Image: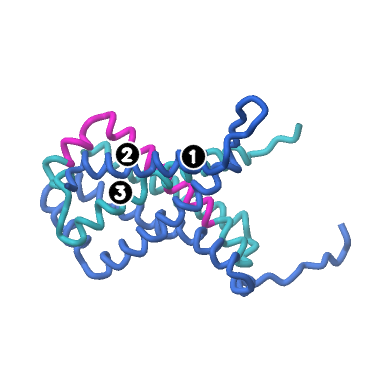
Amino acid sequence: MARSNKPIVWGPFAAGGTLTAFLTPVLILLTLLAALGHAPDLLAYDRLHAFVGHWLAKTVVAGVVFLSLWSAAHRLRITCYDLGLRADTAVATIVYAGALGGTGAALLYLARI
Amino acid sequence: MSRKPYVREMTWRWIFRHPRYVRYMAREFSCLFIGGWTLLMVWGLKQLADGPAAWGAFLEVLRSPASIVFHVLALAFAAYHSITWFNLTPKALPVQLGEEFVPEGVISGAHFALWAGLTIAVLYLAGAF
């Protein structure tokens, strides 16, 4: 059977698509409430710092960031192709590197919390 | 491989040839908002790590008019992505019981119900109401 790296790329995309479908709208709603001046209690510094300070929350946040960024990156890659940008290898390298870079940055910040 | 392969010209104009293509692209463009919002949250993690003053500055940026516009658009695109995703679940996860397949509406409906439950649970646990 021919070797392919497609499952590695596509697995996190499908997982991230499902995760963002279930979770992203309500999370955006939370920061929208904060943007409108009605920040939920959880977004107060002391509560959020204590919440994200727990190792389990850190793991979940890191996972959500990675899967959200990866699925967005993969969709952006396909969209670039659909829009006529045929330099797929370059596009794929840039978007996946961006997703991994964003995840790496999130891990560094989480380690400091 | 022929020596002079024909490469069909490809532009972005096909999007507007059919309403279905516009809807498809609207779903695909949700990635810009979901990815952009996630990066905004990564910056929020940095501000949270930097201390109360930095976190306060982050909340201040969230309250800017540009941020409000971005959030409204992001929420609309993210919700549209969710709806299209759950509408596709009967195709991706067909469930067979005995001879019969479970009706499509039941599978997507279960996803929509779970989505609604999760949304209310997160809002409640975050102290939004």
* Label 1 in the same subunit as label 3: yes
Does B43 appear above or below A66?
Answer: below
- Given residues B120 and A94, the one toward you in this image is B120
**Chain in cyan (letter):** A
**Secondary element at tag 2:** helix
Residue type for callout 1: Ala
Q: Chain of mark 3?
A: A
Residue type for callout 2: Val
Q: Which residue is mark 2?
A: A61
Q: Which residue is mark 1?
A: A15
Left or right: B45 in relation to B24: left
Residue B103, image x and y in percent?
Answer: 57, 39
Which region is colored magenta? Answer: A48-76
Left or right: B85 in relation to B9: left
Tell me the quarter of the image containing the N terminus of chain A: top right
Q: Which residue is mark 3?
A: A27
